[in-house]
Amino acid sequence: MLRWLRGFVLPAAACQDAEPPTRYETLFYKLDRNGDGVVDICELQEGLKSLGIPLGQDAEEKIFTTGDVNKDGKLDFEEFMKYLKDHEKQMKLAFKSLDKNNDGRIEASEIVQSLQILGVTISKQQAELILQSIDADGTMTVDWNEWRDYFLFNPVTDIEEIIRFWKHSTGIDIGDSLTIPDEFTEDEKKSGQWWRQLLAGGVAGAISRTSTAPLDRLKVMMQVHGSKSEKMNIYGGFRQMVKEGGIRSLWRGNGTNVIKIAPETAVKFWAYEQYKKLLTEEGQKVGTFERFVSGSMAGATAQTFIYPLEVLKTRLAVGKTGQYSGMFDCAKKILKHEKMGAFYKGYVPNLLGIIPYAGIDLAVYELLKSHWLDNFAKDSVNPGVLVLLGCGALSSTCGQLASYPLALVRTRMQAQAMVGGTPQLNMVGLFRRIISKEGLPGLYRGITPNFMKVLPAVGISYVVYENMRQTLGVTQS
């Protein structure tokens, strides 16, 4: 991508004090297209594009965020030179972290080893694809000059950021709360980017869940009442809900579903960081297994904290018009008639569902990622947004498929006190009853509307998430 630089600019832009500053000026004035002594973001975008280095708006914005010291929206010569010097130091550290045998060259085996330490598993062939995208002389190894040329204007600062897009975390909320939490770099934690990203994800989740709430309520209704009427299908379910409570009833329980996003995200993020520290030694990178265990335990911790809200959401969704005036009225009546234990009905199958969901979700994501690298990666190992969203949606769907019977039993346990004429059974008893009366298909009642909401939820959540990131000033890592 940046091969032309080696012959002219980069020998000078190697960010070494011994180099004459006039070389920096040469590059700077190529970017300063209107000759006013400063480079704004439009000039940077146009200049890099004309030089054959189109990086995308996010990368260029991050260069400005880092380099624009006086925050005037422009880079002067001193700021530009300081950015190059500081950035090269970081690139050098990243290069050395990959060059395991210290021979001055990065080989495919070293990439495999380094990514394995970071929890990303790839084959040697896939590592060679990464090398090809950086290798300028066709040797299938990357020396310091090639590494510097490739990443000079790429605002990544360490190897973890370079491959971070392959981490299984997209900030996309599809209405289920069992996913592995987001991960943030040390720079994001120090700069406050982490809470902005969590806020963006929370707002996106709220709008996404609200948009797909009718399908979510239909799923709950089919899970709870499906056994009473074999004829309850999607059309019949919607018709029954509208007839009973009007159009507004389709969103019954959604307020509670939205309210629990904030505490659940906060607890899960905090717990995830604590469990990662417990499972890894100081300075050690978190591997795939540690991420899975930490994520599952963090999910269990968050679910323990917010589970009463899960019960309230189910009760409100299943309740009839006028039965509850709102979330607090529902909680008050449950406490009065069923005592405190009712707020944790279905807790055990809910916790058990976290393991198959998170495990299969991660495994399928890794499989899809590997398939893409093997069959579709050519000039770049970055799959782009659509591929990542597709991988995330498919892997999450497979995770739901595996854990759905536990989710159904959880919902029935949460709501069985509201269904007249049914015994109050525990998890094992409910499984036996469902299988004996409805067969194995009974364990998957309501899964169709659950799957129907995945694509719109992903699409809506992504659009809102990206807009919120821009509004909050979150830069792409």
Image (spheres, helix red, strand yellow):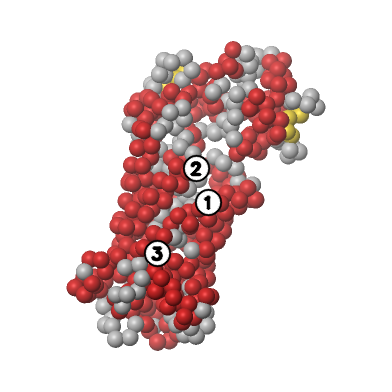
Looking at the picture, how far across and down is residue 216, in whole percent?
44, 67
* Residue with the mark numbered 3: 449
Quadrant location of the C terminus in the rendered image: top right
Of helix, strand and loop, which one carries label 3? Answer: helix
Tell me which corner region of the image, top left, top right, bottom left or bottom right, holds residue 311.
bottom left
Q: What crowding class fits label 3: few (fewer than 14 Cα within 10 Å), some (14-19), or many (20 or more)?
A: many
Q: Identify the residue under disc 1.
A: 462
Q: Amino acid at mark 1?
A: Tyr
Residue 83 locus on image (x, y percent): 65, 29
In this rendering, the answer to whether 306 lies above or below 15 is below
Residue at the far right in the pictured view = 36
Q: Image check: 170 left or right of 297?
A: right
Instruction: Report, in whole angstroms, how far the alpha carbon at label 3 lies from the one at label 1.
Output: 20 Å
Q: Secondary structure at mark 1?
A: helix
The residue positioned 46% from the left and 27% from the top of the image is 379
Q: Where 427 falls versus 177 (above or below)? A: below
Looking at the rendered image, the quarter that the N terminus falls into is top right
Is residue 263 or residue 314 the one in the foreground?
314
Mark 2 / mark 3, whichever is N-terminal: 2
Determine if residue 31 is in view. yes
Residues at discs 2 and 1 in contact (Cβ within 8 Å): yes
Q: Position of residue 78 (x, y in %)?
A: 73, 26
Give the mark nearest the N terminus, 2 or 1.
Answer: 2
Q: Look at 49% across and 29% down and name the residue there.
A: 94
Name which residue type carries label 2: Val
Number of the front mark, 3 or 1: 3
Q: What is the tally of numbered marks visible in this picture? A: 3
Residue 385 numbered mark, or none = 2
